[in-house]
Structure formats: structure tokens, C-alpha cells
Amino acid sequence: MKLEVDNIQFYYEARKVLDEISFKADEGEFIGLIGPNGSGKTTLLRIIDGILKPIVGSVYIDCRRISELDPREIAREIAVVPQIADLSFDLKVFDIVMMGRYPYLDRISLEREVDEERVRFWMKVTNTLHLAERSIKEISGGERQRVFIARALAQEPKILLLDEPTSNLDICYKIEIMNLLRALVDELKLTIICAIHDLNLAARYSDKIILIKDGRIKSIGKPRDVLTKDNLSEVFKIDAKIEYDMDSKSLIIIPLKTINQKSNNELIFPTLKENILA
Amino acid sequence: MIEGIQGTYETEHGKTGLLERRLLKWRATLTYLTIGLFLTIIAATAIGPVYISPGEIISIISYRIGFRIGEFSETHMRIILQLRLPRILLGVFVGMALSVAGVIMQGLFRNPLAGPYVLGVSSGASLGAALSITLLPSIMGIYTTPIAAFIGGLTAIFLVYNIIKLCGRFTVEALLLAGIAVTYLFSAILSILIWTLNRDAHNILLWIMGGLWGADWLKVEIIAPIIITLILISYIFSKDLNALLLGEETAQSIGVDVKFVERFLPILASLITSAAVSFSGSIGFIGLMMPHIMRMLVGPDHRILIPSSALAGGIFLVWADAAARCLMELPVGVVTALTGTPFFIYLLRRRRP
């Protein structure tokens, strides 16, 4: 067992954000984390990485409690690709990926040859080596995301956490990033936990899906067990058609209407319609 | 991309590594800047009402260190060793200090408009100096004002951190805002002081504008070890500052103790600033513009940015002071601001939305 999340509870000030979160993740497992905005996905990822300390419960990696590990030790086990990265200064792609080696270096020593070898390896894997000397500001959104994934991989983690890695990307980059993540799981036996909004991508790429509602796990299991009509209507307030696609061998979710709507054709904002007709 | 990830691992021998190339570049940068600093010291020492040739200056300096090369006159030796050299060296260290403090603040706040004075050190030091000029008799001789200025700077840092404690949550934005508040508070008190006790207004204003007058060896001997030690300490944090360029969350996930770094480094930078400002007055713009120039030249990596900004800051302040000396002893703060403002406007124009 690689990762174990045991009965996590977390509060922001007095507001309970997470409650009774428990699950396990094996090596070579892709876990999709889904849930509405503000359901606690990002908070959960931060707790798994040890950035936030849970009020109750613990996270274990290989049976070691994460709160007892030093941040650099955690950094060698778990890497994160956060939702938004600051881009205030013109950093070179190579230097950004190289920062992933910091957990292996002490305060004043420079990077060694072996660090450059590892960085080159991960840049090749993520298809970013040709960008090495470019500025992060001048490359495309999809390339940038691959660079941040390369940086996380340079930490040589066993567990990779991603927060909405495909939001703001066009459809081609989305598939490219997800294929890359899937390959990391299949071929390098990484454990990936990925918060994701797009239910179709979640259904297609995840081995296991965790559905969170108001800080609690509503459902956990194989995509077809979690992405049910009932769950979607209860958690996301949508009425959806769920089909199985033979070509992609995955579920397809087609949202039809929100459950407050009377019919498919009704406008969401009736006042808008009235105003237009008036 | 999926196929054969395992197979892609091979290193490219025969090609110079990017790391090696970077190291060579860094070495060259530091070598040039160090040579530049030495040439600057020699050249600036030659400038003044009495012309003394660079050759003579070199023989005088080497005589002082213990070698005897070439000829020089006794009077020239006195001018160089007692008047010009201490002032130039004070300029070097103050320039280094302000420039490095600017690099730290800009990196930490990830804001190119931050500078050494964001925590209100400058207004605190000015108030301290003004109080000593108007109220205190010179208890400690000519060192009364520098000591009072240093205490003023520390008071500002102390106040800023207590305001944040009072508000509960520590963020760099809160730090920035508290710094602005303290700056205005101290400026207001300073204005009252100048308003009510206008007999010393001229002296206070002169101090605030910043200058390297009245430099002597003792001042250099006090300030040099403090500033060098503090710069070396800040160098230890250069990787942390690099990681912070990618945002707090990423930095933390790489293993940086963000909480500690964000609390400690502003204090460190402000201490460096206080030490410099207490002997020279609040010289403006170096701490803002040197980090920018050097970032354009050497890139944003703090491991090269900190030492190269230190050297360049020293070089720049010495030349600004040389210009000030030639222009009827203008306060050097005026010269740096006059050259700094056009540069600042240029920067603002260059910033893309």
C-alpha cells in the first residue's frame, strides 16, 4: 500500500471543509478526484502533500505518517502540479525543471551532473527538451503545463498530485496531457491523484474515482460505479445521459439539463427570455 | 508519446551541458564585475578637486597594504587615505547593501516594484535621525545620528510585524500593506518634527536626501562586516527565493519552509537596509533599479543575482557619488533618483499587461 488517507477532518476557521475522508491508493493507480466547485478537492490535495495539517486524521506513505516527515523528505515522495503557477519573472524552462532537484541538494551546493541527466530524462518524457532554453512566458499553455509536470517529475516522486491540469487548455492539449499522465501510471507505476472538472476525461482515464460533496466522500470506486445518474443529479444537480462508448472504451456523460429546469429547451434564466420578448 | 517511455533514457554526451554553460557564464559575470569594482574604486579615487593619477593611487594603496611600488607625495597620500578612500568604500558597502535588500524584497514579494524600504525602514531611520538631530545632544559624538537612525529602522520592522500579529493572518500582502502604513505614520511624525522645530530642518532634510559625507575608516570598519555577513546569510536562501518565483504552493511542495522564509527574509533585508541607511541616509532608487538591471543581464536565478547585484550596486553608488562630488556636493540620493526616475518610467513602459 503506497498511500493511505485515514479519516481526515479539516476546518478553515470555524467552517468544516473536509470530514471523514478515508481512502487508499496503490502504486500504478490513477485516481480522479471530482466534485463541484468548493467541495474540498484542492484542500484535500494540500493535506495529502503535507502543506496543510488536518485537525483529525493522518496521511501515511508506506506506513509512515506524513506529519512526522521533513518537507524535503515529503518532496522526494510526493510532487504537486498546482492549479495556477505564478509567472511574475522570466524564468527559463530548464531552470524551472531543475528546481525539481532542490529536494536532493543542500542549501548552497549547485546542481550536479546527475541532476542534469535526470532533468533531461524527464524533459524528454514530457516532450519539453526542445524548449529548454526558452522563457516560460513565451511558450503555449499546453507546453507550460508539460513543463510544470516535468518539474514535478524531476523530484522523482512516487505519488503525483495534480489540481485541474487540463483546465484552460484546448482539446488537443487536454488529451495530450492526460495521455502523458496515463503513461506515467502504466509504465512507471506512479500513483496519480488528479482533481478534474471534466467528467468525461475523469471517466476515461481514471482507474478509480472519488466523488466529493461538501467535504465528504459521496462515492468511491470504478468510474461506472461512481458516475451514475443518481450521483450526478445529487452532487452536480444535473440530469445526464450516460452511455458506454466502444471506441474509447469508456463512459460518456452528456449533461442534458440542470435538475431545476423543466425541459431541455427551457431557457435557464426565464427573466432573460421575458426581457428579450418585451 | 506513450510508447517506450522507458526506452528514452539516454544522455547526450559530447554536447556541453546546460549546467556547465551556466556555470561558465556565472563565473565570467562575477569576474567582470569584480574587476569593474576595483577599477571603479581606483578611478573614483582619482576624481576630486586635486587630481591624483591612478598610478599614484595604486602605489599609495599598495603602500598602505604593505608593498612599496612607485613614488607618491605625502599630501596626496593623506587626501587618498583619509578623505577619498573611506568615502568610496562606504559607498561600495552601502550600494551593495541596498541592492541586495532590493533583490530579496522583489523576489519575496514577487513584485518588481518592491524595494529595500517596503517595511518602512527608510522613514523609521529618517525619524530616528531627525529626533537625534533635534532633541539629543551628541551623547555618542558623531555616531549619535547613525545609532538613532539604526534604532529607528528596527522600530519600523518591529512595528510592522506587530501590526500583522494584531491582524492575525500572515501573508506577504499584509506585510506590504503594514509597511506602507508604518511609512506614512513615521513620515507624518517627521513632518510634525520639521514643522515645529524648524531650526534643524535643513540638517534633517540633508540627512534624508542621503549622502556619503563624513565617511571615515571607523564607519567603514563598522559597516563592512555587518553588511558582508548579512549578504552571505541571505545568499544561503537563494534557492528558496528561486522556488518562491513559482508561487508559495510549489515552493512548499519542493521542500521550502515557506512560512519561515517569508517571515525571516524581510527582517534580514530590512536589517541590511538599516545598517546601510544609518550611515548614509535613505539613498533612493538603487534598491529598486539595480535588481532590475541585473535581472535583465544575468537572469532571475538568485544564486547569481544576489552576488552580481551586490557588486553592481557598489559600482553604481560609487559613480553616483563621484558625480555628486563634482556637482557642488549634491546629496548622492539626488543623483541616484535623477538617473533612476527615467529608468523607472522606461520599466513601466516595458511592462506588458
Image (cartoon, coloured by chain):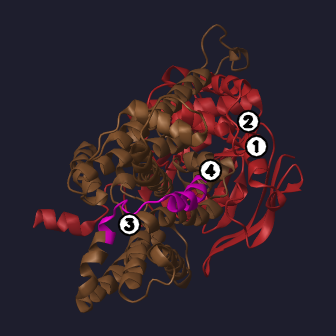
Percent from the top left, x then y, of residue A103? 72, 43
Dot 2 or dot 1, earlier in sequence? 1
- Chain B in the picture: what colour? brown
- Which residue is tagged 1? A76
Which kind of residue does numbered mark 4 sit on? Leu
Q: Circle 2: is it few (<14), some (14-19), or many (20+) Cα within 10 Å? A: many
Q: Check residue A160 for magenta coloring.
A: no
- Chain under disc 3: B
- Residue lying furthest bottom: B196
Q: CA distance from mark 4 to mark 2?
A: 31 Å
Q: CA distance from mark 3 to mark 4?
A: 23 Å
What are the residue bounds of the magenta stretch?
B207-228
Residue in the picture at 63% in, 64% down? B259
| Circles 3 and 2: CB atoms closer than 8 Å | no
- Which residue is tagged 2? A156
Pick whichever, B102 or B39, lies toward us: B39
Percent from the top left, x then y, of residue A233? 54, 61
Which kind of residue does numbered mark 3 sit on? Gly
Percent from the top left, x then y, of residue A235? 56, 63
